[in-house]
Amino acid sequence: MNTGDWWWDTEDQHPAGAMIVPVICASDKTHLPDFSGDHLAWPLYHVIRNNPKYIRRTHTKQAWIVVGLIPCTLKGAKNTDKVWHFVVGTVLSALRNPDITGTDLKWDCADGFQRRCYPLLAAWVGDYQEQVMVAQVLYSSCPLCEIPKGVPIGHSTFQPHHNPRDQNVYFELLDETNINVLHTLGVHPICNRLLQYPLRNVYCVWQPDELHQVLLGLLKDLLHWLLKYLKVRNVKDQFDNRFTSVPQYSGLQGFSKPFDSMKSGSWQGKQIRGMIRTLAVNCAPLFDCSQDAGKTAAETPSDEIVEMY
């Protein structure tokens, strides 16, 4: 984040010598089946970006702090959005009106010096359902731009640069006479409390979700396409044999059943990561052409995921 434009542009809007403290929030509605029946919990976490990445991602460091529990309304309740924003707005109220021109925010730092620090809401980590709640857009709408619902990427009518969402425009349209206009833009006609936070566009706080977007999203869809391709080539049985015959080795995960014979819900991020490490090796001998589309489709994501881990 410190190498991006937002941090530097925000620093320029503060007095000389000031240091911003980007606050990263995260929320996730979670089922609690063990020892609690069919109950739900909706924790709200936050962490400051000034901590190094290796500290934030180490559980024993306890960098992420639970700052509140969002109430879980009954299924089908119509006021879930309003309750969510009221609670989150109350918990994060201290970040709503910082005095960015004042000199009273002096914090004692670890090196013994005092610095003028200004905490600001910087990012929100969560799956798509959480981002829909944060941005208050209609489900299946894009939280970032105004691309129409149901328009697939790559379609002949798809425009590569749709208008990015502008929170100032939506805030002015919060009127009963503009309800249809907001629905057309894919936005709920309710007051989004996160629009009141300074120096931050609520439609730009969405951070990439590796688990749901990459592992359980893009790669899982790619695997289903690859299996259909293997069936057309009549090599699906050979792939299944190789898939279930991976030897035991450090860093490799073995599977006793073929990919398409397991329930969809049993494939989680850990299993996808383990499978992608050997996908190219399992597929490559089945294709005899260097330009084979299936071979390319299997190699490209495998190389990228292996580099990530």
Image (cartoon, rainbow, N blue to C red):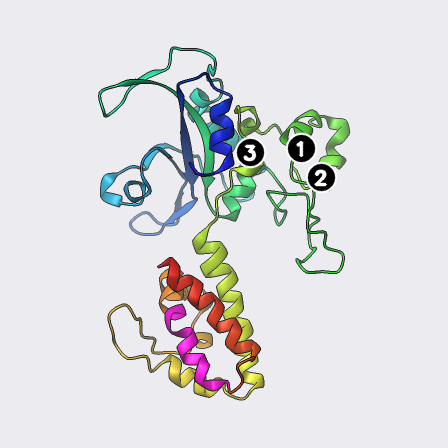
Q: Is residue 288 shown left or right of residue 151?
A: left
Q: Residue at x 38, y 10 (%)?
A: 104
Inter-mark Cα distance, 3 to 2 = 18 Å
Q: Point out which mark residue 183 bears.
A: 2
From the viewer's perspective, is the residue at label 3 or at label 1 nearer?
A: 3
Inter-mark Cα distance, 2 to 1 = 7 Å
Q: Nearer the viewer, residue 5 or 270?
A: 5
Q: Which residues are magenta?
A: 275-287
Disc 3 marks which amino acid?
Answer: Val
Q: Is 276 in the magenta?
A: yes
Q: Which residue is mark 1?
A: 189
Q: Is residue 192 shown left or right of residue 109?
A: right
Q: Are marks 2 and 1 in contact (CB under 8 Å)?
A: yes
- Residue 95 spot, x, y in % from top left: 45, 23
Q: Which residue is mark 3?
A: 202
Q: Residue at x 69, y 41 (%)?
A: 163
Q: Is residue 263 shown left or right of residue 112?
A: right
From the viewer's perspective, is the residue at label 3 or at label 2 nearer?
A: 3
